[in-house]
Amino acid sequence: MSDGDGTPSVLAYQLDFLKLEFEAVNQAIRRIDETTQGTKNWGVIVWAGSVWLALSAPELRPYLLVTAATPLPFWFVDAYWRHVQRTFIFRNQVISDFLNGPGLAASFESGRLQGLWLLDPRAEKVKETESYRRFTRLRHTWRYQEVGPFYGGLVLISILIAALAPR
């Protein structure tokens, strides 16, 4: 796509930036997946260490129930990163809607992007919309399938160990 004199058109330039943004958004999503995996790993290490410590010393057994609190800070950090990740995922959905909807055809007709902001990897331009708030809600990510059951399970296991361990 170029103007008559061989220079790239505005739309071609914008579409190149859109490709770069799409790749950057996907890289951010992958990096956050790695970060949350590291958070889970550290959460398990700290939790298991605290349970082991409380079980290994009879004078510490009364504190077994306290080990149920050790996953909580990791749960919050993990949920927060999932919340951030959801902003990037929302942006991917905005781009997908643009590419698969009337926006792309309208852009070709006008020679420049129509209905899509460039360089908005976390969808900041639409953060006031109800769909954005609902999709990225931190309260939702606390219960997210890869967060809530995992950390909640650690809390429950600590409670069970505290209830069943000999004093």
Image (cartoon, helix red, strand yellow):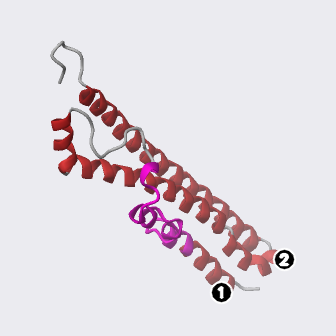
Image check: 98 left or right of 72? left
Mark number, residue 164: 1
Residue 71: image location, x then y, percent: 63, 67
Identify the residue at the far top of this view. Answer: 5
Identify the residue at the far front of this view. Answer: 110
Residue 88: image location, x then y, percent: 42, 50
Q: Measuring 23% from the left and 15% from the top, which residue is drawn there? A: 7
Question: What secondary structure do most residues of the magenta stretch adopt?
Answer: helix
Q: Which residue is mark 2?
A: 59
Image: 138 above or below 18: below
Image: 51 above or below 104: below
Magenta region:
123-152
Residue 146: image location, x then y, percent: 45, 65
**Counting other residues with Cα less than 10 Å from the Cα at mark 1, is it few (<14), some (14-19), or many (20 or more)?**
few
Mark number, residue 60: none
**Counting other residues with Cα less than 10 Å from the Cα at mark 2, is it few (<14), some (14-19), or many (20 or more)?**
few
Q: Measuring 16% from the left and 43% from the top, which residue is drawn there? A: 105
